[in-house]
Amino acid sequence: MPFYELAVTPADVSGTRLGLALNAPAPPPLASCALEHPGGGVLRLGVLGASHVITAEHATGQFSEQVSCTARAHGGALPEHADAPGYHIESSIVTHDEAAFRQLAQRLRDNCTTEDGWLGGTFPGDDAALTVLAAEPDDAGWRWQTWHLYPQRASGGVVVHTASRWQP
């Protein structure tokens, strides 16, 4: 799947300020890809400014998840876990030391270039400043994970990880 080197400054620069918005208007992504469900429907993965948007289209309806700093205006703070009809999300924010942070960044970059269902983007200034999404069909719906990596000068970095599931 695609991996992009984005020539833009990330708009979201703090993992602790990310919010979650469901079914809000989806902003245009900087990079995206579409995955077709074998049972019908499409999931679109999108990298925003160090954040993400997911949109699902199915014969029975549509759904979107946005995790970004601007999502707070349409939803609220990113919760550790939340449920909505047919939807579940879990998130964590973890600080890694330099070696572990760089190792995770490299593994995610490698997965984007070798695995199906992965999309990633890196931002100027540090090749570990990444947003990575991975998705796969799950019964009639989808499940996906995202990683938002925020380097901290020579001391590792912060990783925001989400795991979501949506069923129409």
Image: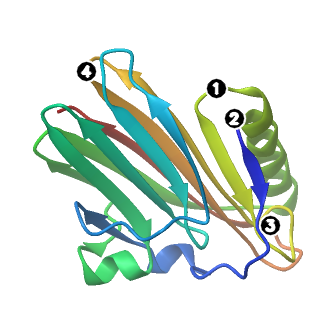
Q: Quadrant of residue 75?
A: bottom left
Label 4 near label 3: C-beta < 8 Å? Answer: no
The reply to whether residue 30 is visible in this rendering is yes
Residue pointed to by mark 4: 140
Disc 1 is placed on an element classified as loop
Task: Tell me, yes or no, whether the two marked residues, 1 and 2, touch with CB atoms within 8 Å.
Answer: yes
Mark 3 or mark 1: whose residue is earlier in sequence? 1
Residue 6 sits above or below residue 90 on the image: below
Instruction: Give percent across and percent down for residue 85.
Output: 10, 44
The reply, left or right, for residue 127 in relation to residue 42 is right
In three-dimensional space, the C-alpha distance between marks 2 and 4, rounded to whole angstroms, equals 22 Å
Report the residue at 87% width, 77% height from top: 125
Q: Label 3 vs label 4: CA separation?
A: 39 Å
Q: Is residue 138 above or below residue 121?
A: above
**Residue 158 location (% of width, % of height):** 65, 67
Q: Nearer the viewer, residue 73 or 27?
A: 27
Q: Which kind of residue does numbered mark 3 sit on? A: Gly
Q: Residue 81, how many percent across, how many down?
A: 29, 53
Name which of mark 1 and mark 2 comes first in the sequence.
Answer: 2
Q: Which residue is mark 3?
A: 156
* Circle 3: element type: loop
Q: CA distance from mark 4 to mark 1?
A: 19 Å
Report the residue marked by disc 2: 1
Badge 2 density bin: few <14, some 14–19, many ≥20, Cα 10 Å: some
User: Dot 2 lies on which element?
Assistant: loop
Which amino acid type is marked by label 2?
Met
Q: Earlier in the sequence, mark 3 or mark 4?
A: 4
